[in-house]
Amino acid sequence: MLSPSAASADMVLSQVIVDLEPNEAPRDDIEVSNTGSERMYVLAEPFEILNPGTREESRVDARDPLAAGLLVSPQRIVLAPGERRVIRVALAGVRPARERVYRVAIRPVAGEVTSEVSAVKVLVGYDVLVLARPAQATDALTSERVGRALLIRNEGNASQEIFDGKQCDGEGKDCRALPAKRLYAGAIWEQTLPHDTPAHFSVARGSRVTKLAF
């Protein structure tokens, strides 16, 4: 049996965001390492996130790759002390017309996993974000400014990461860092700015980064 403190500290992942971009291989690997001194049993449970970033967001089981469009394999691994294993995440079927968002819960469990219905003790794990990008992604961020109130909508078909925000006053002074946000397709982001001047951000969709002012 594993203690929660040992398991939470001893499982290490190579990455926690898997971005399956178009024009690249529709799969990627997550390396799971056991840096502790005890044998570790690990589960990888995929879920699809419906309506991400909205009030209607929900999380549904995605273990059926044909229905979910995503294959996670293997979903059960045993790691000896110091051992590393790979969990593969791959698209099942053609790329979607609109980005599909998944979470893969990778977590150690106490004792050997023998079946789908075994009672297990949940220990600390990771929630890996998986983005299944569409074959033809469209960038369509729109914004509204009313004084210091900023509203940004993602009217495209893929999520975009808004980060490295900065805004200075009219004299170029009192510069403030602004919060970052991953804005999913169909979602809206609202925030209050410190000044009336334009707010500058970097915006990324996968490896493509642009600079925008709102």
Image (cartoon, rainbow, N blue to C red):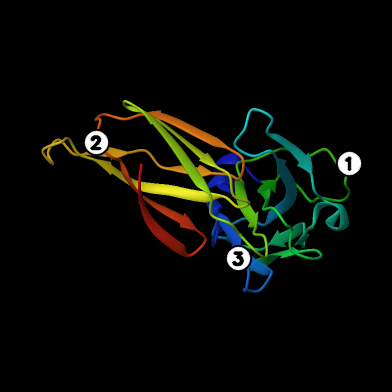
Indicate which label's residue lies in the foreground, 3 or 1: 3
Whole-Å distance between the Cαs marked 3 and 2?
35 Å
Residue 176, position as x, y percentages in the image: 23, 37
Q: Residue at x 50, y 46 (%)?
A: 141
Q: 168 or 141, which lies in front?
A: 141
Q: Is residue 204 above or below residue 150?
A: below
Task: Tell me, for residue 197, which label it has, or none.
Answer: 2
Task: Tell me, for residue 203, which label it has, or none.
Answer: none
Residue 120, position as x, y percentages in the image: 78, 40
Residue 4, position as x, y percentages in the image: 60, 40
Whole-Å distance between the Cαs marked 3 and 1?
35 Å
| Amino acid type, callout 3 | Glu
Task: Tell me, for residue 117, which label it has, or none.
Answer: 1
The quadrant holding residue 198 is top left
| Amino acid type, callout 1 | Val
* SS for dot 3: loop
Q: Residue at x 54, y 62 (%)?
A: 14
| Amino acid type, callout 2 | Thr
Between discs 3 and 1, the one toward the N terminus: 3
Q: Determine which residue is flagged by label 3.
A: 21
Q: Is residue 41 above or below residue 92?
A: above
